[in-house]
Amino acid sequence: MVKTHNIRVLLRLAAVATLTYSAQAASSAAVNSKGLLRRHGGADEHDHDHEELDCYAAGVEEWNKGLHIGAIFIVLAVAGLGVFLPVLGHFVPQLHIPRTALTMGKHLGTGVIIATALVHMLPGGYESLNDPCVGSRMGNFGGWPGTLAMMAIFAMHLIEFVLSNHAMGKHSHSHGLPADLGERKADLENVVDNSTTQTASLRGDAGHMHVADDSLAKNENCDAVAVHTHHNHVHGASFLNTEDANAERHKISTYILELGICLHSVIIGLTLSVTTGSGFKTLLIAICFHQFCEGLALGSRLASVQHQKHAFLRAVLSAAFFMLVTPIGMVIGIGIRYSYAPSSPSSLITTGVLDSLSAGILLYSGLVNLLAEEFGTLEFRGYRASKKVACFAATFIGAGIMALIGKWA
């Protein structure tokens, strides 16, 4: 009995000890679970704070003052060399700059501008506007960069169309109708009465007149003339001088091109100034090549713009503006380097919008006003076959080099 009693006591003690241990184990597990949850929650909170810190982090570390200030003058010199070479070569023949070299440089710049829009600006817009730090501020719509670029293309086309039509309308009112149109009409009517063998017709805003001599119908102000040999007469469709209209359109398209180039030049100047480390030198080399080739393309256009007065002065001022705009962006970047937060939502949205709009402007200018226009002129069609091939090769090389640079910058 004693043994049985002792065994029961021992079993009870064992049971109590087991329950006590189980309770302690459960309590410890609960505490550990709470600790794990607390640590996990703390990690999430820490990660969130770290993310916020990354998005709003300001200031530039390891900023090399001498190198960054020296880069301003490097970019200034390279951009100035690129844009002033065509301008001075056109207005100062004593420099003896080979015209073929300037032509190749112009087409090289065309390729650079197109590649800049497609490889640098547009992808940069997507990267900025779709950054996690932007969040849902743009409505969770990933197609904003393409939409903004498309809007810029349509806007540039509309602006160019309206301004060109306005300029053509002003020119047609001031130069379209001859002052002695009434006298010419009387002379033409007298000739018609006496003519039976050869007839022609001159139609303008004053009416429709038949003439006997083709030389009377060849008005120097007529730009659209349809000759019908079967009826042996001529119709003058308008009194607008085509050369002057094309010159106005060329001037407008050139300034639109400069707008797009200068808009993104400020951005790349600011970006260069807040870049540090090994990436700075790579970006500096890329920007120098980029600015030089863009300068060649823009300078060639500026040199060919026709002005009634002070053509050289206006071309120099426009070239100087291009030369200065990237260094201005660099100076701005240096001034705000301690407060600039490149990953903040406002900075990302501003950069993304400007990149996307610049891409649209450059794409429109590069394809419409440079590629299509330069390769469609009578001057280009009159080139030798070897020179045509060289122009195409220069365009492709410029685009290829700029696309390759996009891997690092």
Image (spheres, helix red, strand yellow):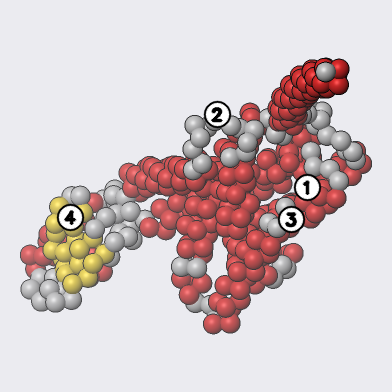
Query: Mark 4 near mark 2, Cβ–Cβ under 8 Å?
Result: no
Q: Secondary structure at mark 2?
A: loop
Q: Earlier in the sequence, mark 2 or mark 3?
A: 2
Q: CA distance from mark 4 to mark 3?
A: 70 Å
Circle 3 residue: 408
Q: Earlier in the sequence, mark 4 or mark 3?
A: 4
Q: Earlier in the sequence, mark 4 or mark 2?
A: 2
Q: Is residue 99 visible?
A: no
Name which residue lies at 58% across and 44% down: 126
Circle 1 residue: 76
Circle 4 residue: 185
Q: Earlier in the sequence, mark 1 or mark 4?
A: 1
Q: Counting other residues with Cα less than 10 Å from the Cα at mark 1, is it few (<14), some (14-19), or many (20 or more)? A: many
Q: Counting other residues with Cα less than 10 Å from the Cα at mark 3, is it few (<14), some (14-19), or many (20 or more)? A: few
Name which residue lies at 80% across and 54% down: 282
Q: Amino acid at mark 1?
A: Leu
Circle 2 residue: 137
Q: CA distance from mark 1 to mark 2?
A: 37 Å
Determine whether 148 is above or below 177 in the image. above
Q: Secondary structure at mark 3?
A: loop
Would residue 290 be found to the left or right of residue 160 on screen?
right
